[in-house]
Amino acid sequence: MSQQPIGRFPIPDLKDLPEDIRERILGVQEKSGFVPNVFLVLAYRPEEFRAFFAYHDALMERSGGLSKAEREMIVVATSAINKCLYCVVAHGAILRIREKNPLVADQVATNFLKADITPKQKAMLNFAIKCAKDANAISDAEVEEMQALGFSEDDIWDIGAITAFFALSNRMANLTNMRPNDEFFLMGRVVRKNDGSS
Amino acid sequence: MSQQPIGRFPIPDLKDLPEDIRERILGVQEKSGFVPNVFLVLAYRPEEFRAFFAYHDALMERSGGLSKAEREMIVVATSAINKCLYCVVAHGAILRIREKNPLVADQVATNFLKADITPKQKAMLNFAIKCAKDANAISDAEVEEMQALGFSEDDIWDIGAITAFFALSNRMANLTNMRPNDEFFLMGRVVRKNDGSS
Amino acid sequence: MSQQPIGRFPIPDLKDLPEDIRERILGVQEKSGFVPNVFLVLAYRPEEFRAFFAYHDALMERSGGLSKAEREMIVVATSAINKCLYCVVAHGAILRIREKNPLVADQVATNFLKADITPKQKAMLNFAIKCAKDANAISDAEVEEMQALGFSEDDIWDIGAITAFFALSNRMANLTNMRPNDEFFLMGRVVRKNDGSS
Amino acid sequence: MSQQPIGRFPIPDLKDLPEDIRERILGVQEKSGFVPNVFLVLAYRPEEFRAFFAYHDALMERSGGLSKAEREMIVVATSAINKCLYCVVAHGAILRIREKNPLVADQVATNFLKADITPKQKAMLNFAIKCAKDANAISDAEVEEMQALGFSEDDIWDIGAITAFFALSNRMANLTNMRPNDEFFLMGRVVRKNDGSS
Amino acid sequence: MSQQPIGRFPIPDLKDLPEDIRERILGVQEKSGFVPNVFLVLAYRPEEFRAFFAYHDALMERSGGLSKAEREMIVVATSAINKCLYCVVAHGAILRIREKNPLVADQVATNFLKADITPKQKAMLNFAIKCAKDANAISDAEVEEMQALGFSEDDIWDIGAITAFFALSNRMANLTNMRPNDEFFLMGRVVRKNDGSS
Amino acid sequence: MSQQPIGRFPIPDLKDLPEDIRERILGVQEKSGFVPNVFLVLAYRPEEFRAFFAYHDALMERSGGLSKAEREMIVVATSAINKCLYCVVAHGAILRIREKNPLVADQVATNFLKADITPKQKAMLNFAIKCAKDANAISDAEVEEMQALGFSEDDIWDIGAITAFFALSNRMANLTNMRPNDEFFLMGRVVRKNDGSS
């Protein structure tokens, strides 16, 4: 794999990390087969690390309402607007897997208006991008339009909150020059017959 | 005080909140004399509330490096760029108090280039605004320029991370239509002779 | 009060100014208790000074149609878009006084969509900002929409003309690095019981 | 000549205008052979008319420093940025005449970087456009650079003030839908052998 | 005529050019009385020259649907957006001639919303500018709106394709610093009684 | 493969196409194993089709100077700026193959500043993006800087001309809603041991 540096700030040694953080990292490694660089780069600041992943999990693993694939669509579309290489590549991989669709991540990242998603999902991404770029101008009328399309109050919160969280995340990845692991680029691109995972 | 709604989403009753959240809110009320609306609006989602304030405290109450007033300058300058009424008004109040300067918040919010702050602080805000608007283009050269001006690696992380956190916070405040408490508008504007607080 | 320079160009001595200009300045001082810096900075060019204040008065002291507070709202909203510290602070003070409302100026300056003003006033500010940023695209249809909302032809001229005049004024203040007097920052923030003035 | 309306607001009859305004208009007509529409459109508001032309004359007929042609270049370049048809066409005509150059106005309006003007004049227009679009960010360093190029303090004031005045003028012309007289389009395009006028 | 260089790249000698290119250039010279500089500048690369003019002719000399004058309007409006001096001046001349209207080119270049053209032509230019600036967001709904206004599928292709071709052309002219021939500036400005040509 | 429509305009039948166009299409099919949709969508207009591919080949298959992979980098970077799904996906595939690098296309499309390419290639893409977005402001100084970095006059023409050609191409793809073939998404992602092709 690549020998490029994975970030612009110091990367702590696993052994020097607080126990809870080291365990979280080892757990991810066991599950995924590698440690996504975001864990290593953010471990430089343990307290922020804990808050970051607690926030992430609260939003991305929430059940009900938006599907997990839809949550990833929001991440990919808004991270592309912010030109965040790490998040587009890493969450593009997760989106392909969750949606069992090898094309959708590149479509959503480049121009979601042309993606193979539903009109309701396009409305969702449109609202997310408004939130990413012009949240100051979100009006009650727009919120009501979303409700008329079938989004619940909680769905709207989720769309906005995921966008807001990745507004943070994209800026941290760009600030730290966080490099996406090589593994992400190919994940989910070859759909298997029986289980749809890559 | 104002009878306007404080947000666009449901506001939970204090008595229905998890114990830790209710206690945090009552603690703030005791200290400040009122409950800043951000606590009430975000309590709608307890898990996100906990992560939000843990992240906030890790960045804003960190000791060493940037002063607490400088951290607030970053919040005010970048929140003004994002037209976030809640954060400009609430953190403008805190900035006036921390800096013991009744003018600086309005200056920083409107046009920080004209504020009564040091050239080094202007460089700090310049970097913060780059991070707020074009984080994708932060280069190694810019990071090195910051170091040449005397900012440590940790200072640069802090400037970027505070900006990133308020990129999230501004979007949540705009999404939820969070109303700044009336109390904030006057705080820190009348400097007292002996202690500098308002 | 502050010992900062009040502008980037030479400030003439009161005694060297033409009689009419000196009298205007002394009149303002008597009425307000201080000389707003705009008078001192622009006095560098007496002919332009006279035209500037004649124009200003024709628009801002015109009776009928828009209230004086509404005229100030237009100034504050469009000056904030132009990041003009002098005009936001000085006219923010006047707006607070005219509206007898200590909150409204900061609301209008930061994000008028969230201000405690009427929907009709928001439409007024929306048209003003169109005029500040994209006057080239004002269409007959937009003018008719304004009329449908109850704005007369003269009101529409006033909204546009005030915006146009402060497009000039904001640029002069930024060009000359005009500093708002410290007095403005607190004016109108403490509403008195009986008369509403600060 | 064209039978199109010359503006979106009422045009007063010459005979109903205050004496001084009627005389000014008749004087222009005698000198130019026609009445430029700006005089008729703005006469709707006599007080503003007087201030407008007093300001205009103070800046555009000022002697010393910038040449009259250079003052017109500033008008044409910044009015083009603002997509103001009236000012580009009318002042384009005056620029051709003053500069005795039938090409320069179209060059400056479309892309001044490609115009047949001196490098110092390009620096002048560059500063003017900064003033038209981002006056909030004009720094002491930029003012000093201009001085290093040979612009006096008064020249810099003039460049900025002309730009500021036409920021007003462009917005009024666009607000009122002011139509440039057909005569302007051809003026100064055919250079005569002996006197250079068209 | 002007002695200014006509471009930033080497200009080949007519005698060194391939036969077909030399003949095309001599043919244009015979017809127009001069060689438009675009032919000389692009002749530096014969293969690209041939493709460029084949593409140009396929779009601009196509019969049926849009008139030739309307095709030129699209060129002038979108080239003005791209600040391409060569195309605004050269195609402005052709537009004046084709439309037998000495005013229309300057109107369309500066602000087509104020031009003496039909509402349907304004809709055409509006679509062209969307294609010039935000083609990524052209929706089926917008295409259908154009059809509802009476544009055929082929008309819509033409509007978009002319805009696309001049997106290329404008960039080449700006890259090469292509100078419009002096002759273009006056062409079509003086309408003759009997034949309408200049 | 996908059953989605491949464009918004009529797609001609292969058998109805002029002989030369049908042969070109069959030739591509034989070589690639499928017909890239750009051939089918543009065949609607045979003359434009011929000019388009003649221009394309003149630029993209030119030998000497920029490598073929570098030419593709320019296409991918500028097409991503223009949010052109077809060109990002199709030329991303070609870039991966030409560069024998499965990561580089996604890097260049998302944020070329973070791509695994040389500093000289980043300067190349920087110039290309200037040409894509602000060609009007390309100065002699910038051209000289490029020469100082080792780019010849022909290299600079190529960078600009490829960008200009894809400014056209991206607009045509977005206008026609051209769908990238499913095959492109995976091409070049799995690097084979011995030959580097996918």
Image (tube, coloured by chain):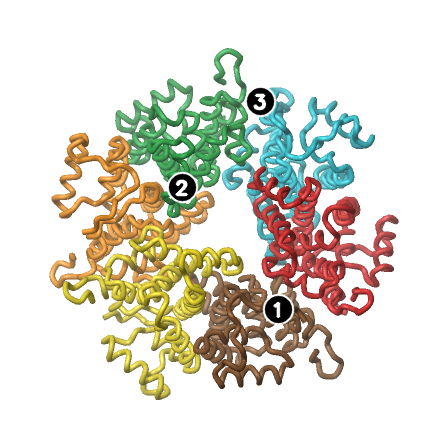
Chain colours: A orange, B green, C cyan, D red, E brown, F yellow
Occupied quadrant, residue C193: top right
* Residue F131, image x, y percentages: 46, 60
Identify the amino acid type marked 2: Glu
Residue indicated by mark 2: B142
Task: Choose mark 1 or mark 2, whichever is in front.
Answer: 2
> Which residue is rendered at x = 73% and y = 74% of the image?
E190
Residues at marks 1 and 3, CA–CA distance in whole angstroms: 60 Å
Identify the amino acid type marked 3: Val
Residue indicated by mark 3: C190
Identify the amino acid type marked 1: Val
Circle 3 packing at 10 Å, graded few (<14), some (14-19), many (20+), is some
* Relative horizontal placement of residue F145, taking residue D174 as reference (left or right): left
Marks 1 & 2, CB-CB < 8 Å contact: no
Q: Is residue F2 above or below residue D98?
A: below
> Which residue is rendered at x = 56% and y = 61% of the image?
E83
Residues at marks 1 and 2, CA–CA distance in whole angstroms: 41 Å
Task: Choose mark 2 or mark 3, whichever is in front.
Answer: 2
